[in-house]
Image: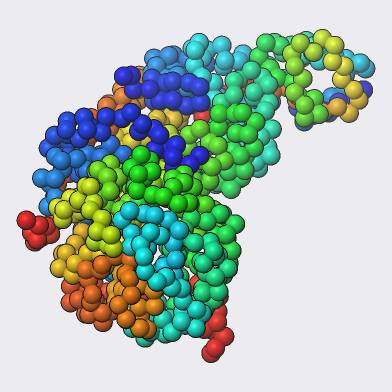
Amino acid sequence: MADELIIGDKALTSRLFIGTGKFASHELMGQAVSQSGAQVVTVALRRVDLDRPQESELNYIPAGCVLMPNTSGARTAEEAVKIARIARAAGCGNWVKIEVVTDQRYLLPDNYETVKATEILAREGFVVLPYMNPDLMVAKRLKEAGAAAIMPLGAPIGSNRGLKTREMIRILIEEIDLPIIVDAGIGKPSEAMEAMEMGAAAVLVNTAIATARDPVAMARAFSMAVEAGRMAYLAGLAPTREFAEASSPLTGFLV
Amino acid sequence: MKVLLNGREEDVPTSVTIEQLLNSKKITPGAVIVVVNSEVVKRELWPDFVIKEQDQVEVIRIVGGG
Amino acid sequence: MSFYDVYKQYEGFDFEGFFQSRTPDDVRKALAKEHLEATDYLTLLSPAAGNFLEEMAQKAHRITLRNFGRVIFLFTPLYLSDYCVNQCAYCSFNARNKFTRTKLTLEQVEEEARAIAQTGMKDILILTGESRQHNPVSYLKDCVGVLKKYFGCISIEIYPLEEEEYRELVASGVDGLTMFQEVYDPGVYARYHNGPKKNYHYRLDAPERSCRAGMRTVGVGALLGLADWRKEAFFTGLHADYLQQKFWDVQVSISLPRLRPSIGGFQPGYPVDDRSFVQILLAHRLFLPRAGITISTRESPEFRDNILPLGVTKISAGSSVTVGGYARPDGRAPQFEISDPRSVAEIKQMLIQKGYQPVFEDWQQWDSLEQQLCNF
């Protein structure tokens, strides 16, 4: 049986999601996505610069990719809902990454507003993937609100600091019966692999690819790391030996 | 007449349609979304949709994002 | 959505084939995992895992220490009434059994409460047979009103109720529910039960209704001996897991009631020996690291002492399983024969000697706490 990641009505074979921001050019972005085999890419909505109309990135995204507009720029649930509706009306499909950020220093997501937005959009038929600060109770509420997957951050957006929230993400993977997709903070392929070995369903990478010296090669490196991590997870990691203190038998009373 | 276009006050001809407005700004219609007073206006309505004085018009496009 | 939907997912699943195909290596892999999936759990219930009890025990012990520390909670059952309209083949309170039925008056409840409270117990589990005529919810509420003066935790083990009725009981001071499904296999269930209890689904959904009604602790269990224990244990664990996932503010626990001799001389069709009992206990602990595990006085003193470090979190002590048995131990019909007759003081002594702290009260209801503060 193929190892597919089912989200909404899509069965994905690639577990690397790529963010399309911050690339030096549309061409590089397009090549990076296609070389990595990613099937889900995030995009954002912005006002057109009326003085300098530009060509759309959309033309460079490989055909067949699921477009996942984010709600970046939203500071409240209402704004996120509005952005999601506009994106759907624009023909982006019904996937949405909810991203509500009020804190402008670390760009950490506002979990409370995120739950509210998730509830509204899931009811409206969106496939909702909320970006969140890994907190078990919030993840449970997001699940109840109808999220299709949960996207905890590994470290602040764009920080490339790796899985700083490793322990909390591990708990989400253990406790939440939804795909857990590590979003934000992953700076190296080895960190993406670490997340996958832990049992993350996928990872979303943007800055680490977009700002590498060779983004196309880096996208491929991430793709391989994600695949290797997934394979290791499925293969079942060998037990790490526990050096427990020599303990006396506990079942000696059984005959 | 005056409208609010992408947050900026602009002078536009009276009874201008969305299509005409985009053309005047040299915006390729294929890649944008138009929101008038918080409502998305479907593409097929653009040739007939007349913008009124003080309307808030947002022309939005999809860009790269994480 | 009900737990039955989870149960149904295994309809047609070849349990026998799965159990027989498990290898020592499968067991080792399941044991090495930090978080067990349902199939790992099933693997630990397989015959192959029967040869790994010591390894399972070491890990279960560590997990339990990590999650619960060196404490064991104590509780006492209090039988209010043995009137019952059901005919459960294995139970002494079976309506067909001829003996003089009795039901405590509120004065008698108070007498019992006083006798139990004197031993230091603070956590009480009240039980009745199923009879809406003799043991209506209003009667239970009155009893709880009396018991509240003596106990910090009051749980019920009675016939299944409507959500609204659970809510009433919660409001009156009940904070826990124990509801054994007895047997998860609907066919076997139908064979052993007659009377209103015949309604399998109504009973199966009762824990869930009580969670919605605001119950703080909920315990599930299967009567060990009625059907293939490997499957029964599996569904018990899945049921607990289901409740834990769905009602994350409720403390879920599992009991392992092993069938004991009762009036009528019922013989279990699938007797569970000590080794198998231990395997069930260990598999539960490894699958549900944070669930409570309760062992009653159905088990013998030696056996209870021995399994203490394997994942047990709560035990009953100084139990009487007859109506009115604390104030007047006069030899009325017990629900079943208990095996551990030790007093609360003896149990307490044993726990301390084994390095455990006996805890008499897990938590106090806010209003009783408030009362205490007002008394200052």
C17 on left or right of A22: left
Query: In this view of the protein, which residue sits in the foreground, A87 or A215?
Result: A87
| Residue C7 vertical placement versus C365 (above, below) | above
Residue at left offset 39%, top offset 46% = C239
Task: Report the label total.
Answer: 0
Query: From where the camera sits, is residue C77 visible?
Result: no
Relative image position of residue C297 (x, y in whole percent):
26, 68
The outermost residue toward the bottom is C376
Query: In this view of the protein, which residue sits in the foreground, C340 or A129?
Result: C340
Determine which quarter of the picture holds residue C187.
top left
| Residue C350 vertical placement versus C196 (above, below) | below
A60 on left or right of A56: left
Relative image position of residue C230 (x, y in whole percent):
24, 43
The outermost residue toward the front is C98
Determine which quarter of the picture holds residue B1.
top right
Residue at left offset 18%, top offset 73% = C354
Residue at left offset 35%, top offset 72% = C322
Query: From where the camera sits, is residue B28 visible?
Result: yes
Query: In this view of the protein, which residue sits in the foreground, C11 or A213?
Result: C11
Residue at left offset 26%, top offset 55% = C266
| Residue C252 vertical placement versus C156 (above, below) | above
| Residue A105 vertical placement versus B11 (above, below) | below
C51 on left or right of A165: left
Determine which quarter of the picture holds residue B53.
top right
Relative image position of residue A212 (x, y in whole percent):
40, 26
